[in-house]
Amino acid sequence: MIKNITKNKIIAEEYVLCDSFFSKLRGLMFSKRKPLVFVFDDEQYINLHMWFVFFPIDVVLLDKDKKVVEIKEKFKPFTFFNSKNRAKFVLELHNGAVKDCKIEVNDIIF
């Protein structure tokens, strides 16, 4: 389960963990809509693409303490995103999840 601890709000009951090189590379390409959690070894700048993902998503970046450091809403198909902040975790959520769950920078997630 993914939960916004700060707001005591469930974001997703189930999710797919992407912690291997291949799972991170594949992400949502050619797949159905489902929440993904990417885990990186260290905090780093995150570069994402939406090639072969045919629906928009919301992206939430978390630091090592699972605090929201950056949000990208309505990340559209066939576009790129380069974070301005370092993150250790990346949540790829359905479009509208940020508004629905009232996710804001500095919230604690998980």
Image (tube, rainbow, N blue to C red):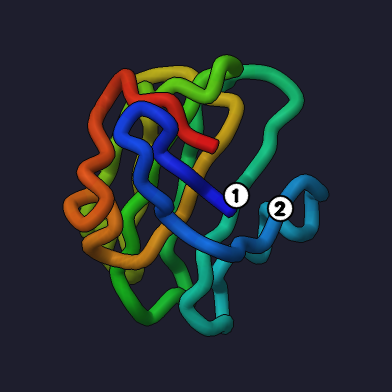
Q: Residues within 10 Å of mark 1 (few under 14, many from 20)?
A: many
Identify the residue shown where x is 37% and y is 38%: 8
Q: Which residue is mark 2?
A: 18
Q: Position of residue 86 (x, y in %)?
A: 48, 19
**Along the polypeptide, which appears first: circle 1 or circle 2?**
2
Q: Position of residue 10 (x, y in %)?
A: 42, 52
Q: Position of residue 97 (x, y in %)?
A: 29, 58
Q: Position of residue 19 (x, y in %)?
A: 77, 46
The three-letter code of the residue at mark 1 reads: Val
Q: Residues within 10 Å of mark 2 (few under 14, many from 20)?
A: many
Seen in the image, is 39 located left or right of residue 19? left
User: Which quarter of the picture shows residue 65?
Assistant: top right
Identify the residue shown where x is 36% and y is 22%: 69
User: Which quarter of the picture shows residue 36?
Assistant: bottom right
The three-letter code of the residue at mark 2 reads: Cys
Q: Which mark is residue 104?
A: none
- Secondary structure at badge 1 equals strand
Identify the residue shown where x is 46% and y is 55%: 92
Q: Are marks 1 and 2 in contact (CB under 8 Å)?
A: yes
> Looking at the picture, does residue 21 appear above or below residue 109?
below
Identify the residue shown where x is 69% and y is 32%: 40
User: Which quarter of the picture shows residue 44?
Assistant: top right
Marks 1 and 2, how far apart at CA? 6 Å
Give the total number of marks visible in the rendering.
Answer: 2
- Secondary structure at badge 2 equals strand
> Looking at the picture, does residue 15 appear above or below residue 31?
above
Pick the front one: 48 or 94: 94
Q: Which residue is mark 1?
A: 37
Seen in the image, is 64 located left or right of residue 81? right
